[in-house]
Amino acid sequence: MTVAVPDTRAPRRFGFDLTKPVLYLFAAVLCVLIVLPLSWLFVYSLTDKTGALTLANFYRLFTESSFYDPLATTFIISVSSAVICCAVAAPMAWLVARTDLPFAGTIRALVTASFVTPPFLGAIAWELLAAPNSGLLNKLFRDVTGADQDVHLFNIYTVSGIVFVISCYTFPYVFTLVANSLDRTPGELEDASSILGGGRWYTARRVTIPLVLPALLAGGLVAFLQAMTLFGSPAILALPAGFHTMTTKIWSLFQFPPKPELAAAASLPLLVLTVLLLRAEHMILGRRGYSVVGGKYGAPRLISLHGMRWAAFVLCLLMLMMPVFLPYFALLNAAFSPVATTFVTFQNATWQNVHFVLYELSAMTLALKNTIILGTAAATAGTAIALVIAYVTARRAVKGWRLLGFLATAPIAIPGIVLGVGLFLSYTRPPFVLYGTLWILLIAFVTIALPSAYQQLQAAFRTIHPELEDASRILGATRLRSLWQITAPLLRTGVVATWCFIFVGVMRELSAAIILFTSETKVISVLIYDLNESGDLGAISVIGLGMLIITFAVVIAVNKIPGFGTVRFRT
Amino acid sequence: MRETTMNRREVLKTGAALTFAGVFASPVRAAPPPAEAVTLALIEAAKKEGAVTFYTAMDLAFAERLGRVFEEKFAGIKVRVERSGAERVFQRIGQEYQSNIHAVDVVNTADQSHVIFWKRQGWLAAYLPEEVVKYYDKKYYDPEGLAIVTRVLVSPFGINTNLVKMEDAPKSFADLLDPKWKGKMVKAHPAYSGTIMNATFQIARELGWEYFEKLARQNVMQVQSATDTPKRIALGERAVMIDGAGYLVIRNKEAGQPVDVIYPSEGTPVATSPSVMMKAAPHPNAAKLFQSWMHGREGQQLLIDYARQYSPHAQAVEKPGVRKLSEIKLMREDPEGVEKAADEVKRRYSQYFKV
């Protein structure tokens, strides 16, 4: 077949190459998004009230027990959570990915459910379940055993309680990484070991485990970071117990009289630690794939559990009681109970909380409106920015594409509350007075969402071979036209999935929003936090269940689209 | 931004200069404004504005009830309630005003000292509804008409009667230090709640800060809001509420929950809760109408009947079930003292209680 190839030297449709300005524009936007807040953070942490250069803020940070105690507590919580997450998630991921576990798909779906449950909502639900005296589980325990009023099975207002709750909503990160890694591990390597006489345990020890170890370690690091940067759960559980973590301490420094210079100084250890750990993660994950060389592999062979199949399934369900079944039950119970921790019966069931939220709670309409506006805007803007950058980096369309890629991934190193502090310091002053508008929240949410959106879309671009675009361009299409007619239709599912996950992520975001909201720009997560402070648990349960319903609707909609990847949520 | 680092006293100095300038410009400012009746013109103007934004420290359910009843009476005016602890409300307004955000119309705080600060800043609008001048004792409103006391709050003990019998219950602040109450008490936070800020100040003045130092060793559950402590004892999470909204304990008791209220023998902390209208209010007419209605017979009767609080309105009818204010031994309220000591109270409190 012959094709009349038009003169490739045909004059460009535009007088100049549009790609350069696009690069500069996006680089500038990303710089403003990331560099501005971080710069103010550094400036504030190194100056005193008069603006003079000083190290006093850091000196206080490391010499006053009210600062280094939270630092130590945070470290203990983060390490314990990471260890527990790995210990629970790795076996479960193995069961789901490599054995003939019944209903493995259901288990994966339930892990996704705990993935998308806002951690602060989980923390409140666990308050309902395991507060030492009024917790439903403790009440049940006393009813069954006839134990004294003072005896309790669980006390959620402790360091171990917080570790438990954080682990409940962090283990899916480890699970996803390990399960994906196991899914990708070629079965032939294990077969080769078996053929050469390796027993099952020997194969697992010498082949399978080394192959997934990088993913497990990376998962552990991610879990550590999550636990360290979470605001909601410790604020809900640690403050009643009389101690701070780093995030709640930073937040408390914003209470009247605000001490932004100390808040900035306290933010920096979190930032530095995050950067270091992400470097470590990168180094470990960078080694992954060393053994997976060339050729096409069959799906890994499933190991038969024989009689243990159902026992394993029950074990997984029991594990998933903690993040999903029990908390959802507690919220449902509180939503229809006259007193949040009284078991609902036919006699005492009430619509009072639902009525209150729907017809009386006047802050609800505005918060819902703000959340939807911000969710839609952040998802659209985030997807659009990520799309352009992913295209530029995947196709290496312009010089300096590496820089763009780096800038788009950089926010992953900025914990939400640190970003909140930085944005507050940046945008409460001229020339950009954005505090009090939805813009500042939009910037926060887009910045937080950008790394995962970018990674996901870049992966999507990689699956589309440039040959297709090249063919279109050889046949005479401009770059924009081939993007529009060839690439865009192929990318559609990836784009829709990214959009939805940013939207869900915005609904869960609390740690940046708690620093940046004003009464006119309150979002649902902040409203729930407010209601928790005033003790209105019934109203929280109703709103929380509503949030979960919206989230699941979005997640299920995305699942209907084939071939989307996993998205990393941050809170 | 640097202004946020000013403490109250620093602001006090700048504020004093501002007030002086204000006085110079309009020497009649100190004179009380004329009492204003609710006219048809005011109602029309308010309806044209269509909304009023109400920042308050009241229990959420009551604040929303007030809003809904007002909306029914004056159709077309939406009341948006923004509820948080009084100290948080104070912080929010400060932060918003610094960034030139003037969203709030009417504020009800539980801490009189806030009014001193706002007056000094010149943020308050003078407005005296007719009914207030007619039926309120002069001590319940500002002579310049910048603030009106909406309700009087007391912060007694509360107990869960399933967990502790009335005869075994603590009767005094001293009783709370008994080891048998260790791990059984819940307390609200002065950096969040205005009621608790005043209570903490008064208790520290009467019993000394050593008292809190000892109390902190009792393994006290620390929540934020004075409206949360009554809910925690109603849940049965703790047996004794050290401080908080007495009115909610009474309300819950009347709703059949196993709770009761105890007025400590050393005296019960008290906080009068004033409402103000902001000069920069985005809905000035709706704000006036709401101020007037809330402090009128209807709003005040709701305060007594629904919220079980104390009203300053002379014609409001008390409903039995709440001990008369005159029959309670009260501690002395001292807004000027709180104004000066607020930062110190927060600092020492977090030193002892760690949060």
Image (cartoon, rainbow, N blue to C red):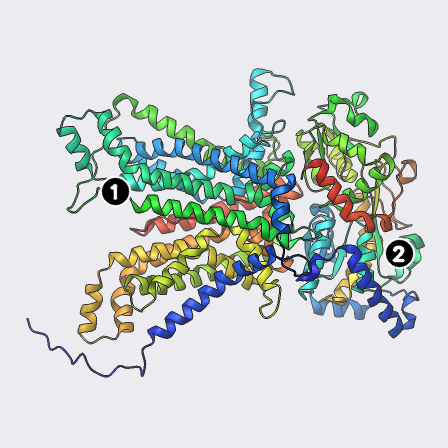
Residue A29, how many percent across, how many down? 45, 67
* Residue B76 seen in the current view: no
Q: Secondary structure at mark 1?
A: helix
> In this picture, is A122 found above or below A524?
above
User: Residue placed at 13% from the left, 28% from the top?
Assistant: A196
User: Residue placed at 7% from the left, 73% from the top?
Assistant: A2
Write down the quadrant of residue B170 in the picture: top right
Along the line of sight, the residue nearer the viewer: A339 or A464? A464
Residue with the mark numbered 2: B141
Q: Amino acid at mark 1?
A: Arg
Chain identifier of the residue bearing label 2 in the image: B
* Residue A476 seen in the current view: yes
- In this view, the mark in front (1 or 2): 1
Write down the quadrant of residue A5 in the picture: bottom left
Chain identifier of the residue bearing label 1 in the image: A
Along the line of sight, the residue nearer the viewer: B154 or A462? A462
Residue B268, how many percent across, how many down? 85, 36
> In this picture, is A398 found above or below A515?
below
> In this picture, is A81 found above or below B69?
above
